[in-house]
Amino acid sequence: MPQHLLAIDQGTTSSRAIVFDRSGKKLGVAQVELPQSYPNPGWVEHDAERIWQDVLAVTRGALANAKLTGKDVAAIGITNQRETTVVWDRKTGSPLHPAIVWQDRRTTDFCKQHHSDETDLKLADKTGLLLDPYFSATKIRWILDNVSGARARADKGELAFGTIDTWLLWKLTGGKVHATDASNASRTLLFNIRTQQWDKELLEFFNVPASLLPEVRDSSADYGRTDKALFGAEIAIGGIAGDQQAALFGQACFAPGLIKSTYGTGCFMVLNTGSELRLSKNRLLSTVGYRLKGKTTYAMEGSIFIAGAAVQWLRDAVKMIRTAADTEAIAKSISGTQGVYFVPAFTGLGAPYWDPEARGAVLGLNRDSGIAHIVRAALESVCYQTRDLLTAMSADAVAPTELRVDGGMVVNDWLTQFLSDVLKIPAVRPQTVETTALGAAFLAGLHAGVYSSLDEISKLWQTERRFSPSMPIADADALYAGWRDAVARVRSH
């Protein structure tokens, strides 16, 4: 039986595929950047057809780089940017509208109009989420109400909705499978995470027809097989999870109390809360971590919208850096920011503020401030935002004694050390920082029989480096107090 696993990792700013062996070692990788479209202020869109073509290309590329064919792969796992919404024609497979990205804020007015304490309590109790443009439900509603004829066609059952995992699954299987997993479903505001079913009352509230929705399966399950024409052989698809839940799985955070934070386009901290659904009193989210054999493992999550995207902005929009890798040397070149703070609220602020109308700012500039101060302040902002989340999570659950970190940003040693200093706990970086893709591969491998248990997967997780706090606590607290003051200045209320 083949032992290789292929992970498709479709993110906000890139699509990539990685081939792993059963020990979690990378054998082949291919990646391509994904352009963003901003048709109006606060709007963010992707070309769903472009995503599919890119995924096809990188999957073939990863196999070629690993010198393998489709016949050598035991199973495919899919992980994806969550909440991003695609509605397509069931007959033609063509999207009705560009994909509306999770960062998009076009439904802010709807959320404001329908906001009430009673609504918030009901939504939190059923979904673990807040009424916010971030989630899929208001995006689906917007497409149905703003694309000509869409609502009538949806009512006739002619259209399908999916987050990116569902869209890719549909394309990979030649339109045979319309499904998602419980972790992605839990991010739509339409799925009751207690009953593990689409919720009739929520569908009515958001005016979304049930006929649009995919079937919800376990995170490790039979998702059909790829069309033979795509990779020269049919390959089983055995795992799906939203990117942050896949990272939780890839970090082997299988026991309640284990916590990870992923640094990609945004930053997402996720705490395993086990079989217990814990609702936050500090505006964090409760969500499905993963579901295996019908058994749900819940998680608590804090979401930061802009992390690596701030570095991308420095590179592409204002040309302060040439590559993301340059930021480490620049940050080290000065002893501090001299009071400069960068609040990257380009699309509002996420947890624990949930302020969709806040906007980004660089504060505290003086005559001596230069590019290095702004670049370093951008990196520091990621660490301060993480402390915002950790403070809220500690108040809601258990104060963690260490944080497992992953994602592209944490290859920067300076950033990871500063993170540990600001949080005042160790930051632990694993051997494989692409834990999102690895988690998808593990889920697929579980279903395919490559792994027999979570214990077996746990033994594959290894520390690459442990960063311990070295900054005096008083200094860390003073820097963080400055951050809190900067955030207060950009808040919309």
Image (spheres, rainbow, N blue to C red):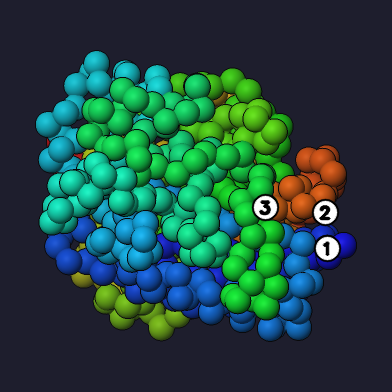
Q: In this rendering, would 309 be left or right of 37?
A: right
Q: Quadrant of residue 400?
A: top right
Write down the residue under mark 3: 238
Question: Pointer 1 and pointer 2: residues touching (CB < 8 Å)?
Answer: yes
Q: Residue at x 32, y 59 (%)?
A: 89
Closer mark to the observer between disc 3 and disc 2: 3
Q: Position of residue 217 (x, y in %)?
A: 57, 40
Above or below residue 131? Residue 81 is below
Q: In this rendering, would 341 be left or right of 193?
A: left
Give the number of the disc on residue 450. Answer: 2
Write down the residue under mark 1: 3
The residue under label 3 is which amino acid type?
Gly
Q: Residue at x 36, y 61 (%)?
A: 91
Using the image as rendered, state which of residue 44 and residue 198 is in the foreground: 198
Q: Position of residue 269 (x, y in %)?
A: 51, 43
Count residues near mark 1 (Cα–Cα under 10 Å), then give few for <14, some for 14-19, many for 20+.
some
Above or below residue 356? Residue 330 is below
The residue under label 1 is which amino acid type?
Gln
Q: In this rendering, would 49 be left or right of 256?
A: left
Which tag, 1 or 2, sits closer to the chain's start?
A: 1
How many angstroms separate mark 3 from mark 2 (CA)?
11 Å
